């Protein structure tokens, strides 16, 4: 693998950094610490995403026909690394541009693209993901939310849990089933969150304000034209979506930025020469770099249009390990930051808690890697999306 960046890619990274330096306010750390689902960061993200759109940086990886610039997947990840290292000022809208939009581009019909893609491209909407349920988190195929076929559409009844951003979301990428069993009975519905019968309840959590919720559906009518894809196609679409989500957040970039700041502070305090501290710091740095290389391997395969493989699960596990190692190091050797001295350290700690749950729990990633990469015996089932702990 070539570990360097060419001149154009390096300039792109510098451009993104310049935009961040210009557009992030002096109190950005105080905004970011509240979490991407908070009122403060959500409101900020709308204005920031509009500015990214003006700079042609919000959806540059989309096709030109839909407002993008057809940039490479590497350009997309360079941009994602810089945004995440800064604390992800796109807030909940990173999901819109990274996988909601691309899924609609691939599977949406003409009317759905015309309705939803311009809104995402303008940075004016927030989506939430209606996947996990009280009894269907680690086994997404066992979801129970019902979509009863009625004249003109579907009547939805059920509940979702751990749904990030639901309180402020305008739309929901909702999974429900038309029959009691079977993956073929699952449908994807593009739900207006203002529909009668939708109730959202916030769940207090350590990972940030307003990040996770319960969502209840009572006789919610969804027009048939809001079904994404054909009946029986949902599992294919979900698989495609999760491949984008699992490595779509370059958490290692934020972790490495936190470590670099820590190293500077340790030097100022005269503690950097402590061999134990240097050893622990070095181990954390190594895990961040390992996660980056694993993700790059997956990105390289995507750039070559190769089919998804087990490296996506391995990369996700590497990201989780790096996040946790950095959080553990900071907690042990720089606990003052968690007591209010460093807002970005607090933000990192909160997000590291969620790292092993969001986008598929850590244990699920290991199970999938065991079957798909190590070819170990396990439950006989085809490759399929597993569970999203939250989103």
Image (cartoon, rainbow, N blue to C red):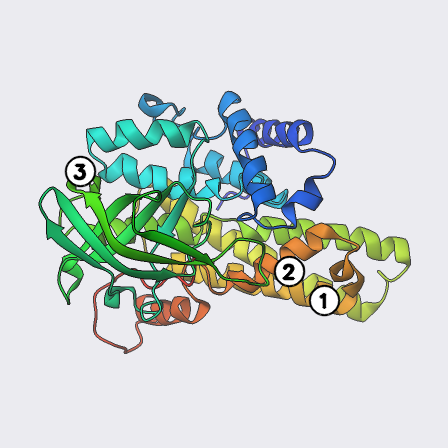
Q: Are marks 2 and 1 in contact (CB under 8 Å)?
A: yes
Going from N to C along the chain, the mark reached first, 2 or 1, is 1
Q: Position of residue 151 (x, y in %)?
A: 8, 45
Relative to 374, say whether 291 is above or below.
above
Residue at the spot 28% in from the left edge and 34% down from the top edge: 105
Relative to 252, say whether 229 is above or below.
above
Q: Any mark on residue 225, and which?
A: 3
How many neighbours does mark 2 have within 10 angstroms: few (below 14), some (14-19), or many (20 or more)?
Answer: many
Q: Nearer the viewer, residue 219 or 160?
A: 219
Q: The C terminus appears in which quarter of the rendering?
A: bottom left
Can residue 156 be seen? yes
Quarter of the image for residue 120 reads top left
Circle 1 SS class = helix
Q: Nearer the viewer, residue 372 or 360?
A: 360
Q: CA distance from mark 2 to mark 3?
A: 42 Å
Residue assigned mark 1: 331
Q: Nearer the viewer, residue 358 or 195?
A: 195
How many neighbours does mark 3 have within 10 angstroms: few (below 14), some (14-19), or many (20 or more)?
Answer: some
Q: Any mark on residue 100, and which?
A: none
Q: Position of residue 384 (x, y in %)?
A: 26, 61
Q: Position of residue 275 (x, y in %)?
A: 81, 68
Residue at the spot 50% in from the left edge and 28% down from the top edge: 57
Residue assigned mark 2: 349
Please state which of the two labelled residues, at mark 2 or mark 3, is closer to the viewer: 3
**Viewed as shown, does residue 369 lie left or right of 182?**
right
Q: Position of residue 298 (x, y in %)?
A: 41, 50
Q: CA distance from mark 1 to mark 3?
A: 50 Å
Q: Are marks 2 and 3 in contact (CB under 8 Å)?
A: no
Quarter of the image for residue 341 reads bottom right
Residue at the spot 53% in from the left edge and 43% down from the top edge: 91
How many neighbours does mark 1 have within 10 angstroms: few (below 14), some (14-19), or many (20 or more)?
Answer: some
């Amino acid at each position: 693998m070539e570990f360097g960046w060419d001149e154009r890619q390096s300039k792109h990274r510098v451009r993104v950094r310049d935009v961040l330096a210009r557009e992030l306010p002096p109190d950005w750390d105080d905004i970011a610490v509240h979490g991407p689902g908070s009122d403060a960061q959500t409101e900020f993200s709308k204005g920031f995403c509009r500015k990214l759109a003006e700079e042609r940086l919000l959806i540059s990886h989309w096709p030109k026909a839909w407002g993008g610039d057809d940039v490479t997947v590497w350009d997309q990840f360079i941009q994602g690394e810089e945004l995440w290292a800064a604390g992800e000022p796109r807030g909940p809208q990173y999901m819109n541009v990274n996988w909601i939009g691309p899924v609609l581009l691939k599977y949406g019909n003409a009317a759905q693209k015309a309705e939803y893609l311009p809104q995402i491209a303008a940075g004016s909407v927030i989506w939430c993901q209606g996947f996990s349920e009280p009894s269907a988190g680690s086994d997404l195929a066992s979801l129970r939310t019902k979509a009863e076929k009625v004249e003109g559409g579907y009547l939805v009844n059920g509940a979702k849990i751990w749904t990030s951003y639901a309180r402020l979301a305008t739309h929901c990428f909702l999974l429900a089933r038309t029959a009691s069993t079977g993956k073929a009975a699952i449908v994807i519905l593009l739900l207006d969150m203002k529909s009668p019968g939708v109730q959202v309840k916030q769940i207090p959590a350590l990972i940030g304000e307003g990040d996770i919720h319960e969502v209840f559906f009572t006789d919610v009518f969804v027009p048939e034209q809001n079904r994404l894809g054909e009946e029986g196609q949902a599992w294919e679409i979900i698989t495609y979506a999760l491949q984008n989500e699992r490595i779509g957040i370059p958490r290692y970039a934020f972790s490495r930025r936190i470590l670099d700041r820590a190293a500077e502070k340790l030097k100022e305090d005269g503690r950097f020469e402590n061999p134990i501290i240097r050893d622990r710091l070095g181990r954390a740095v190594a895990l961040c770099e390992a996660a980056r290389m694993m993700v790059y391997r997956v990105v390289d395969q995507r750039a070559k249009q190769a089919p998804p493989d087990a490296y996506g699960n391995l990369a996700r596990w590497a990201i989780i390990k790096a996040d946790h190692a950095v959080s553990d190091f900071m907690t042990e050797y720089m606990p003052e930051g968690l007591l209010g001295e460093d807002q970005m350290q607090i933000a990192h700690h909160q997000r590291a808690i969620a790292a092993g749950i969001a986008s598929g729990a850590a244990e699920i990633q290991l199970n999938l890697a065991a079957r798909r990469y190590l070819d170990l015996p396990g439950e006989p089932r085809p490759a399929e999306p597993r569970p999203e702990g939250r989103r």
